[in-house]
Image: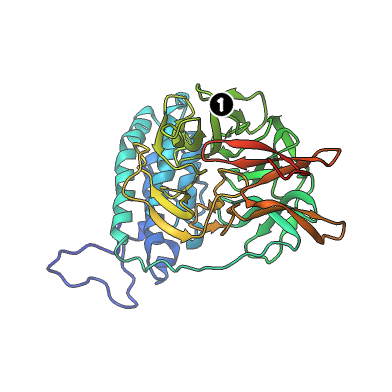
Amino acid sequence: MLDFGLAKTPAESALTEADAVMGTPAYMAPGQKEGGEADTRADIYALGLVLFEIASGRRYLPDEPVSAGEPPNPRFVHVVERCLATDPDARWQAASDVRQELQWAMQWASQWAPPAPASGLSSRRLRLLASSAAVILAIAALLAWFYLPSKPPAQVVRSTLALPANSNLHSFALSPDGRYLAISAQVNGKRQLWLRALNASDLQPMPSTDEAIYPFWSPDSLFIGFFADGKLKKIAVAGGPAQSLCDVPYGRGGTWNRDGVIVFSPDGAYNHMLQRVPDTGGVPTDITKIEGGYKHPVFLADGRRFLYMFAVQSRERTGIYLGSLDGKENRRILPDQSGPAFASGFAFFVRDNTLVAQAIDGSSGQPKGGAISLAAGVSKTQNIDYAPVTVSETGLLLYQTGGELAGSQLAWVDRSGKVLGNVGAPGRVTNPALSPNEKSLTYTRPTALSVDTWLRDLARGSE
């Protein structure tokens, strides 16, 4: 039923020629019927027709609602709707996308039992749909393989984003659709979220996000989650006030799946668990059982498992872990002490001041192959284990160079900002606090497995 441009044996010459329109009319994309160029997206359209016919028992009529005659699985309907978009740019752009979305729809269907159909679809048709799912996934995989050799090399475009003047970057995140960048930054002494549409040149401040840190996105790219004022909050990209979801002592990263579940780290200290909460708000619940330093969780493609960084007073147990919402999976898969990002089957993190990508097997959750070095001079920042990298589902990668604290220098300055003198030697020093009598100074120094607090006698110069 799918043409692939019409089949031929290896001994035959090509069946098509320039300016010829060939194919099975009932399964041709709109532009293809008019003689337009047929590419992967034309076969995506044909695949959507097959999916509709399997589900409904009849052929699709142009401009007909896809939900007509469908079993009540809105996720399956969403997959087919995008396959059948008239504009090729609005369809799924690769068969691998369809396969992933079908797996998502099948997972939802396996957890939800539809009522017996009163009319339209028979139980036999529903069984046929279920039994055909594996065949459809195989077709999607074949499409992905078929077009792989003919795809042109991906064009790499590199650019630099400038921050506002007098700013101090804390953390940032790209939206899944690759259209927006959310930044937590302190500008002129005030920290809040800033939003930039990537087709625009300016960052825009987001009201009601004062002191926001560690932004993360809803899977539909419509909301941003963040931590501020001892709360986990969310705010719509379109505007409006932020909504508090639950209490959080000092959030260290969150992640959001398609089922409306947010997994987050309430605190980076060693006596906390990872927690989950509905994206509508509520009382959070623990999803891990061992106390430790949990940081920067990120969901895998299935929306059930996630990666996170875990730290305890043991190098053998510290690293990047794989966890699951049911709590059955919690195991170290990489020894690196770095918060991860994840997209397109790869984990991204910092190793030895280098940004690397590591392929993750979708079935086992284990690393496969070696790590790939992407950029040198990328270090964890003053947020200790935060890796300054974010990636969208569209393949856009953004990272911050520098970030290492080895050159931090405490200094006395006057009201105009003029440096009056240094305090101690340069080093990995953060969070200074001066005593009221101005005789002592406290600050922190991160180590490999912890953060130590130091006291300095300013008169003697000892610490």
Say which amino acid is labelled 1: Met
Q: Residue at x 14, y 65 (%)?
A: 10
Q: Residue at x 50, y 44 (%)?
A: 338
Q: Is residue 132 left or right of residue 167?
A: left
Q: Is residue 174 left or right of residue 44?
A: right
Q: Is residue 145 left or right of residue 298?
A: left
Q: How many marks?
A: 1
Front-most of 393 and 158?
Answer: 158
Outermost residue to the left: 11
**If the image is split into quadrants, where does the C terminus sit?**
top right
Return the x and y of residue 113 as percentages of the image width and height. Answer: 45, 24
Return the x and y of residue 49 as percentages of the image width and height. Answer: 39, 50
Find disc 1 in the rendering and name its residue.
273
The image shows residue 60, relative to residue 34, as above or below, that is above
Q: Residue at x 44, y 53 (%)?
A: 356
Q: Quadrant of residue 431?
A: top right
The residue tagged with tag 1: helix, strand or loop? Answer: loop
Return the x and y of residue 348 as percentages of the image width and height. Answer: 46, 49
The image shows residue 452, relative to residue 88, as above or below, that is above
Front-most of 348 and 143?
Answer: 348
Q: Residue at x 55, y 53 (%)?
A: 177
Rendered image coloring scheme: rainbow
Front-most of 295 and 363?
Answer: 295
